[in-house]
Amino acid sequence: MEDYTGTPKNDIHQNGRTDLELMALVEGASPPSDSTLLRNDSYRNDAMMGSCCNRRNRLRCRMSRLLTCISRSICPVLFGTKLNWLMLCVPMALIGGQGLFGHGWVFVLSLLGMAPLAERLGFVTEQLAFYTGSTVGGLLNATFGNATEMIICIMALRKKMIRVVQLSLLGSILSNMLLVLGCAFYFGGLKHPHKDQKFNKVTAQVSASLLLMAVMGLLFPAVLHATGTELQIGKSELVLSRFSSIVMLVAYISYLYFQLKSHRLLYDSEDAVENDGDSDEDEVLLGFWTSIGWLTILTLFISILSEYLVDAIEGASTAWNVPIAFISVIILPIVGNAAEHASAIMFALKDKLDISLGVAIGSSTQISMFVIPFCVVIGWPMRTHMDLNFELFETATLFITVLVVALMLQEGTANYFKGLMLILCYLIVGASFFVHVDIPDKHPGS
């Protein structure tokens, strides 16, 4: 027999006997007995076996510690939000997804169940940012801030549902710029009626410029296709979309460097207000690996609900006799961004309008400059011909919306009347999509 090193056990025993006998002769003592040699040999074998067991159980110990930390953090994660009662919709959606409920009920339950999960995902990301620093924390917030929309889009891309992806992303942008920002301006103005609330107009104009760049990226493929001036029909539009998407991703990464490194002083006042006003909320409640574990768990459940949501959207449209465009552009973003709506209004009531703009305009910038190009690029290896041609009606709606919001942000002030105008603009957009029949040209990969 041989031990794990490949050395015969008889040789090990003999070597051990020789070493002990030599030590006894040097010290002038009597040679060790056979029982002593056997006992020493057994100690050595026990040490070898113990090291092997430690190596095998090391991973198990780490996993058990992670599970223990996750179980202890259930209370702050699952019950630390007022939306926790909506988590009851998660198991009901999973049950209904097995064919027990109609498509309309599955759609509603999945949508309601995703709202608290998306809010908790943002909470866990903020906890993780305590350990990663401001730069990596900013990247995490940029990546996971719209993780729900990204997961829904990836699930839809797998099923070649390109229009659902385009309309849902467009709806998120319109909802954040008109409804969320409008409600923040309106309720903040009612709370402070005798003055105009102020915000950092320099950072707001930077975000508005990025939104205009995103509109440029969406406008040219739509106009190129509508005018029939493609060099290669069906190919030039796709190639232009992929090239523009790569350029937009480069621009967004440059914007993150601009915000977090080179021109960080522009955003220091905003961060200072946030830290001074919410010192009670900036508390480390989760460990690093616990945050990683919860990030994985929440992302998994959001992925499952997103798949049920995508599968049920067409059935819900038929059951309710409501256009898919209206469901994707209006209903999905209102419920999916419920947590962002509430936080933007809350900060506006506290006269912290810079944070409200960071929630509304910042989220729109992330979707237009990161999520949309990301979907185009990731659809490339999936052989799904996702492009930036959102059709003329949708692109025109986005273009006019960005112009209206950019004009609102020029002065650096806000009041309830500006908020009311934005809300009324959103009502016009919603009514337009309710009567709009979406008949897009067939995409090559759909």
Image: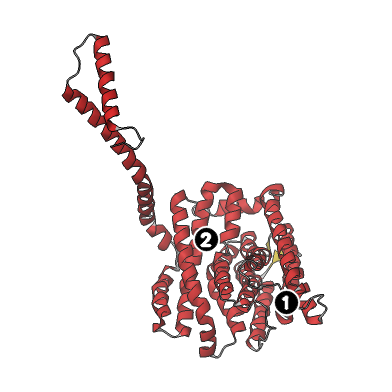
Let me know if residue 348 appears in the view. Answer: yes
Vertical position of residue 51 compared to residue 354: above or below: above
The location of residue 307, given as percent across then percent down, is 50, 74
Vertical position of residue 410 compared to residue 260: above or below: below
The location of residue 385, given as percent across then percent down, is 66, 73
Let me know if residue 279 appears in the view. Answer: no
Residue topped by disc 2? 122
Q: Nearer the viewer, residue 406 or 380?
A: 380
Colouring convention used in this rendered image of the protein: secondary structure
- The crowd level at tag 2 (other Cα within 10 Å; few <14, some 14-19, many 20+) is many
Residue topped by disc 1? 395
The residue type indicated by label 1 comes to Thr
The location of residue 213, given as percent across then percent down, is 75, 65
Quarter of the rendering occupied by the C terminus: bottom right
Q: Residue at x 43, y 78 (%)?
A: 97
Mark 2 or 1 closer to N-term?
Answer: 2
The residue type indicated by label 2 comes to Gly
Vertical position of residue 354 compared to residue 314: above or below: above
The location of residue 417, given as percent across then percent down, is 68, 74
Q: Residue at x 24, y 29 (%)?
A: 41
Q: Secondary structure at mark 2?
A: helix
Vertical position of residue 319 compared to residue 261: above or below: below
Q: Nearer the viewer, residue 351 or 111?
A: 111
Q: Secondary structure at mark 1?
A: helix
